[in-house]
């Protein structure tokens, strides 16, 4: 699919970059990305992927917009309160970039659902807010052998990583999986939700935007994605740290 004259003008600042160029922009146009969640993380992810020219964006979310969402979920507005988040997000993306295609799924992500739908996409971005969905995304992406960009936020901190556990890294070793990083879900109730503890809204923008950046890197092949690396952000200290992690030995993983 070639770029139209309108698209060349729209994405001119991308095309001027030697690392992206017209070829990279065509990769973005031909890409099919599924985003889980149209909330705090999903909002900046969706906006920047749409602006970047991802040709097909899928959104899966079963929630509706509420007033308390608007402090951080910037893809929605006061006029969309009570609407399905998928519909509100879809309308916002159409306003931002009418050249892309948006698919919406009004349900909760599950491995069962992913078994049918995930093979239609090239990459999965997990912007969910609960551990059940995060583990479901990780397991489904591994089964479908599609890259996964996943992130999480707390009160004033966040993290993200990129997963391709079905591939071998530059060191000749198998890339780690999500369960190599987080072997088990924490006990129910151990980590309270933001509805109980609060969250600074701009934090979701920082982590979500970084997740969009990693998605663009994976699709275009530029730079070094966060494979085998967990990026940590402490908003109060204005500090980024990176932790490397590897695949666990087979005997440890089996325990």
Image (cartoon, helix red, strand yellow):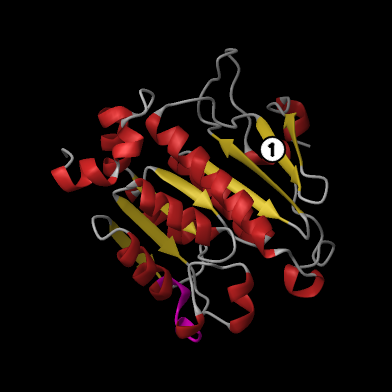
Rendered position, 38 above or below 117: below
Residue at 29% of width from left, 49% of height from top?
55
Residue 59, percent across and down? 42, 62
Task: Say which quadrant the C terminus sits in.
Answer: top right
Q: Secondary structure at mark 1?
A: strand
Judging depth in this view, the residue of 26 and 167 nearest the camera is 26
* Residue 225 placement, left or right of 194: left
Residue 239 in which image quadrant: top right
Q: Residues within 10 Å of mark 1 (few under 14, many from 20)?
A: some
Residue at coordinates 44% horizontally, 57% vertically from top-left? 47
Nearer to us in this view, 150 or 14: 14
Q: Which residues are magenta?
A: 80-86
Residue in the picture at 45% in, 64% down: 60
Q: Which residue is mark 1?
A: 231
Q: Is residue 92 above or below residue 46?
A: below
- In the image, is residue 201 part of the stretch drawn in magenta? no
Q: x and y percent of residue 133 in the render?
A: 60, 59
């Amino acid at each position: 699919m070639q770029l139209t004259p309108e698209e060349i003008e729209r994405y001119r600042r991308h095309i001027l970059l030697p690392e992206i160029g017209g070829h990279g922009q065509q990769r973005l146009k031909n890409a099919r990305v599924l985003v889980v969640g149209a909330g705090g993380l999903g909002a900046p992810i969706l906006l920047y992927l749409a602006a970047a020219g991802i040709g097909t964006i899928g959104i899966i979310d079963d929630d509706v917009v509420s007033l308390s969402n608007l402090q951080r979920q910037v893809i929605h507005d006061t006029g969309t309160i009570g609407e399905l988040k998928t519909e509100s997000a879809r309308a916002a993306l159409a306003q931002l970039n009418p050249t892309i295609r948006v698919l919406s799924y009004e349900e909760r992500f599950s491995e069962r659902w992913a078994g049918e739908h995930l093979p239609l996409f090239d990459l999965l971005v997990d912007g969910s807010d609960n551990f059940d969905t995060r583990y479901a995304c990780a397991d489904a992406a591994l089964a479908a052998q599609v890259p996964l960009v996943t992130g999480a936020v707390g009160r004033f901190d966040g993290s993200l990583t990129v997963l391709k556990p079905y591939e071998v890294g530059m060191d000749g070793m198998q890339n780690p999986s999500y369960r190599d990083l987080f072997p088990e879900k924490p006990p129910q109730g151990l980590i309270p939700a933001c509805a109980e503890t609060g969250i600074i809204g701009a934090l979701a923008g920082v982590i979500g935007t970084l997740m969009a950046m990693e998605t663009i890197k994976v699709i275009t092949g530029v730079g070094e994605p966060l494979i085998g690396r967990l990026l940590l952000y402490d908003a109060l200290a204005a500090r980024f740290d990176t932790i490397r992690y590897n695949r666990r030995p087979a005997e440890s993983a089996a325990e």
